[in-house]
């Protein structure tokens, strides 16, 4: 049976009205009475105990997490990891999905839910560098994820996108592949993961003394999902484009591409090798297993929660930027496992 306000009143030895006044922040309550009511609320697990904690400490014990799309496996797994890390800190997570829409991304920053939370872990897609200054106007702690918005005064957890993409491309080049598709660039973006990963792809070719064939740099305007990967690679095959490898800018694109390659009667990795990015769980169970980049998938959510929890508890100091070590995780999609690359974290 749910605990009621009357149960709290009996435990504290006060009237239900007094309990209501405490919960709703009525100022003219004796401190000892307020403390007794708050203690009873905590002891009984009354449903308003988050509010009671907020009255006592100025904090709710709730944090926000705003992500583009939960149907994208990377973000779904990230959300689960953030929830797990928050639980270890005694925190609850409210998840919001903005879909990469600018109006929703702005609403996330200023909407009513911010009054319920102690801070926000935020991964924008539509906002850009020009929006960074406005983030300083916020009255709550903020931790940024991703590569769309950076600000020297805001904590940020990011990835080593360029170096990791270069390592993925070099892995294919070492395997003798020379016609490597870059699957995922977005010509409408000049900031974010896509241009950074494309830079790494180009750097690997330059270091190997190879020119990049523009035909192999294949944009994907829509979501980086399985269907886009399959459809885009299918179009390359229909057009007769010659390629012997695919570096997909995330694992969902890679898995879709690999599926389409096999449906067309080609073999992975014999005819076409495939590398992804993100190290989502699904890639471990594909056939063949997917070679991928682990950008720090366990470190990113843990560090984001740690930074936010410290700020909500009043830890001062300059903004911190964390970019975890990444790792190439070899799988069957590029042939024999490269154990040396698997065990060497590249910083």
Image (tube, rainbow, N blue to C red):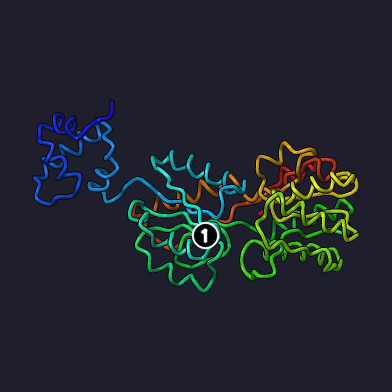
For label 1, the SS is strand
Which quadrant, please, contains the C terminus?
bottom right
Q: Residue at x 37, y 47 (%)?
A: 62
Residue 156 x/y as whole percent: 51, 59
Answer above or below: position of 46 versus 138: above
Q: Nearer the viewer, residue 47 or 273?
A: 47
Q: Nearer the viewer, residue 57 or 163?
A: 57
Q: Residue at x 83, y 53 (%)?
A: 172
Task: Determine the image quadrant of residue 134.
Answer: bottom left
Percent x, y of residue 217: 79, 64
In the rendered image, residue 144, in percent from the top left (x then y), is placed at 50, 59
Would residue 70 be found to the left or right of residue 339 on screen?
left
What residue is pinned by disc 1?
Answer: 321
Rendered location of residue 23, percent (x, y) = 20, 44
Who's the residue at 82% across and 46% down the image? 334
- Residue, x 48% and y 65% (percent of image)? 103
Position of the N terminus, as image quadrant, is top left
Q: Is residue 104 above or below residue 256?
A: below
């Amino acid at each position: 049976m749910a605990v009621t306000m009357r149960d709290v009143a009996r435990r504290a030895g006060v009237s239900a009205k007094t309990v209501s006044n405490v919960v709703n922040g009525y100022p003219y309550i004796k401190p000892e009475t307020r403390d007794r009511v708050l203690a009873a609320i905590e002891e009984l697990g009354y449903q308003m105990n988050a509010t009671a904690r907020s009255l006592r400490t100025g904090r709710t014990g709730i944090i926000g997490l705003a992500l583009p799309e939960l149907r994208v496996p990377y973000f779904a797994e990230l959300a689960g990891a953030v929830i797990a890390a928050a639980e270890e800190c005694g925190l609850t997570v409210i998840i919001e999905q903005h879909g990469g829409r600018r109006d929703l991304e702005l609403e996330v920053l200023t909407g009513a839910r911010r009054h319920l939370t102690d801070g926000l872990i935020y991964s924008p897609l539509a906002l850009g560098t020009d929006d960074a200054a406005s983030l300083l106007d916020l009255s709550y702690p903020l931790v940024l994820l991703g590569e769309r918005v950076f600000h020297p005064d805001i904590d940020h957890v990011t990835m080593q996108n360029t170096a990791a993409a270069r390592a993925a491309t070099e892995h294919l080049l070492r395997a003798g592949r020379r016609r490597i598709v870059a699957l995922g660039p977005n010509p409408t973006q000049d900031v974010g993961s896509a241009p950074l990963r494309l830079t790494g792809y180009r750097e690997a070719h330059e270091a190997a003394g190879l020119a990049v064939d523009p035909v192999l740099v294949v944009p994907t305007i829509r979501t980086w999902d399985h269907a886009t990967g399959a459809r885009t690679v299918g179009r390359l095959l229909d057009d007769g484009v010659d390629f012997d490898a695919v570096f997909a800018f995330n694992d969902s694109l890679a898995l879709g591409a690999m599926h389409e390659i096999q449906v067309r009667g080609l073999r992975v990795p014999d005819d076409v090798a495939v590398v992804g990015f993100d190290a989502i769980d699904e890639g471990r169970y594909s056939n063949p297993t997917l070679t991928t980049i682990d950008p720090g998938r366990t470190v990113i959510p843990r560090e984001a929660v740690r930074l936010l929890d410290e700020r909500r508890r009043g830890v001062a100091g300059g903004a911190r930027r964390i970019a975890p070590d990444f790792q190439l995780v070899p799988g069957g999609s590029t042939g024999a496992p490269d154990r040396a690359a698997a065990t060497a974290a590249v910083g």
